[in-house]
Image: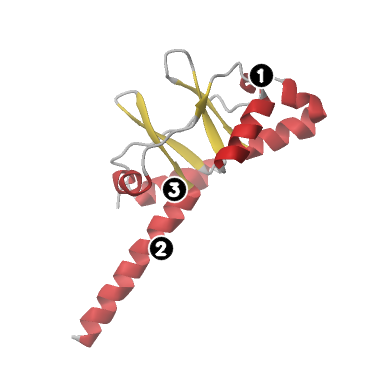
Amino acid sequence: MTVAHILKGKGRDIVTLPPHRTMADAARLLAEKRIGAVIITGADGAIAGILSERDVVRALAQSGPAALDHAISKHMTAKVATGRESDTLQDLMSQMTLGKFRHVPIVEQGRLIGIVSIGDVVKYRLAEIEAETQAMRDYISA
């Protein structure tokens, strides 16, 4: 199974914010959308960074409540690992495990086309395992 299969099932909605917005804005958006990360984009729409729940917690631990008034750019992860639609689930799981992150923006031809979370990967991997199990049951029964 590839990233394209995941995006086909979950959709290609992407939540973004510009880097000048505040951490409070980002925290509200994360809570409102019930998501774990937001992609930070520049004026040209290119990925400038990613801000995750972990980044918000780190900012609060470092700066206290004042962190909520900081620009997102101060606390976002600027070096963003991305994936492609052709990546396999195994590729994506390895990338997430090695990098210790839970969200991967998907980029094709320099354009942001989706985002995949570890929850998405687990959901599709479980579906894959269930399909394999059912195929084995059917084979044994036949």
Give the number of the mark in front: 3 or 1.
1
Q: Are marks 3 and 1 in contact (CB under 8 Å)?
A: no
In the foreground, 141 or 95: 141
Given this view, does label 2 or label 3 mark the residue nearer the observer? 2
Which secondary structure, mark 2? helix
Q: Residue at x 58, y 28 (%)?
A: 77
Q: Which residue is mark 3?
A: 94
Q: Residues within 10 Å of mark 3 (few under 14, many from 20)?
A: few
The numbered mark at residue 104 is none
Precedes in sequence: disc 2 or disc 3: 3
Horizontal and vertical percent position of residue 87 = 32, 43
Cα distance, mark 2 to mark 1?
38 Å
When asked about the image quadrant of residue 74, the answer is top right
Query: Which residue occupies the extreme bottom position in the image?
Result: 141
Q: Amino acid at mark 1?
A: Ala
Horizontally, is 140 left or right of 20 in the view? left
- Taking the image as shown, residue 67 lies to the left or right of residue 47, namely right
Tell whether label 3 touches label 2 (CB within 8 Å).
no
Q: CA distance from mark 2 to mark 3?
A: 16 Å
Mark 1, residue position: 71
Q: Amino acid at mark 2?
A: Leu
- Residue sitting at 34 percent across and 23 percent down? 110
- The residue shown at (34%, 24%) is 111
Mark found first going from the N terminus, 3 or 1: 1
What is the secondary structure assignment of the residue under circle 1?
Answer: loop
Check the image and report above or below for 57 versus 49: below
Left or right? Give the position of 44 relative to 134.
Answer: right
Figure quadrant of residue 23: top right
Residue 142, how many percent across, how many down? 18, 85
Residue that label 2 marks: 126
- Sequence-first disc among 2 and 1: 1
Q: Residue, x 55% and y 24% (percent of image)?
A: 78
